Image: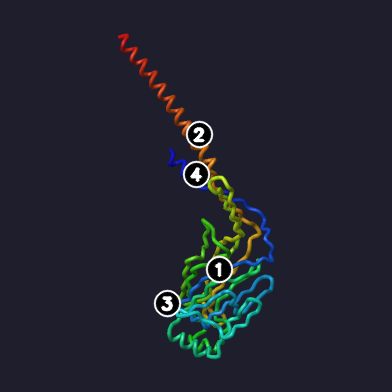
Amino acid sequence: MALFECVDFLTPTMTKTMSVDTVPWSELLSIEIDVTFPEVPCQILYVDMYDASGKHEVDVRGRLVKTRLNHNGKVIDDYESAGGVDLGGVVLFQRRPEHGSEVRRAKMAKEGCRIHGEVLAQRVAGSIRISTGAEGFGFMQELFGNAWEVNMGHEIKRLAFGKGFPGAVNPLDGVKRSETPSGIFKYFMKVVPTTYTDLRALFGFIPWKTVLQTNQYSVTEHFTPSKDWLHVPEVFFTFDLSAITVNIAVEAKSLVYFLTKTISTLGGVFAMTRMVDRYVDVALRVGSRHTVDK
C-alpha cells in the first residue's frame, strides 16, 4: 500500500487543452535539421528556402554546416565557402575558384555529405529544398552520365520545429530513404504550435513553473522517380502551421497531497483492521460460550 502511494505521488498528472494560436507571425520559427546524403558530395548540395510571404533564400547557410564524409561515412571535415557573403546573418554558400576540380575529386572518392544545424523561417507555409539545382546541366552530365541519376538517398537523423519535451516525438527522426532509380522525395508536414507547462513543487511546498513554447508535427511523404532532365532528384521539406495550439500541462503532486492521502489510507486500513478484529473477537466468544453450554 505504501509503495502504491509513493508511485502515485511520483507520477505527475497531465492535461491537454486546445486554443487559438496567438504567437505573432513576425516571430521566427526554428527548424533543426540533420540529414546525411551518403552518395552526394557536399560541393554540389545546396539548400534553398522559400515561404508563402514571398521570401526566397538561395543557397542559404545561416547556422547550417555541411560536413564532408568519406565512403565509409566517417567525417573528413566541414566544407566551407571561399569568403561567404553575410546578408544580415544569412551566409551564402559560394563556389571556390577550384570548384570543378574539388567536385571531381570528391566524386571519385565517393564522398557523402551531412547537412546539419538550424534555419529560421517565418511562421507561414514554406519549404526547404536540398538539391544540386545550382550546378550546370552539362557539368552534371559529365559527372553522373545523366543529371537525373544522382542518388539522393538520405537518412534524416533529426528534423524538429523547436525544442523537445518529455513525450515529444518527431516522426522523421531516424527515417532512411533510398530508391532506384532516384527521384524527388517530398515530405509534407503539419506543424502544431505547442505550449508545454511543467508545474512542480520544490521540496513539496514551493511552486516551480517552467513554460516551453515549441512545436509538434505530423508528416506524409511522396516519391516521384526521375526519368529525364525535367525531374532532377531533390528533397523537399514542406511545412504549414496549424491555427490551433496544443497546451500540455504537467503538474506534480504536492507533499501535502501525499501526506494527506497516505495518512487517510493508513487511517482507513487501521479502522478496517480494528473492525475485523472486533468481529473475529465476538465470533470467538460466541463460539466458546456455545461449547461451554454443551
Q: Earlier in the sequence, mark 3 or mark 4?
A: 4
Location of the N terminus (image quadrant): top left
**Disc on the earlier residue, 4 or 1:** 4
Pointer 2: what residue?
264
- Residue 97 drawn above or below residue 172: below
Question: Which is more toward the observer, 106 or 5?
Answer: 5
For the residue pair 145 and 210, the one nearer the viewer reads as 210
Q: In whole angstroms, how far apart are the C-alphas of marks 4 and 2?
A: 14 Å
Alpha-carbon distance for marks 1 and 3?
22 Å
Query: Splitting the image into 4 quarters, where does residue 51 fall?
Result: bottom right
Residue bearing mark 3 = 74
- 157 is higher (above) or lower (below) than 269: below
Tell me whether circle 1 and circle 2 mark residues in contact (CB < 8 Å). no
Give the image location of residue 42, x and y in percent: 51, 81
Disc 3 is placed on an element classified as loop
Helix, strand or loop at label 2? It is helix
Residue corresponding to mark 1: 32
Q: Is residue 220 above or below residue 278?
A: below
Q: Which residue is mark 4?
A: 9
Q: Residue at x 54, y 74 (%)?
A: 235
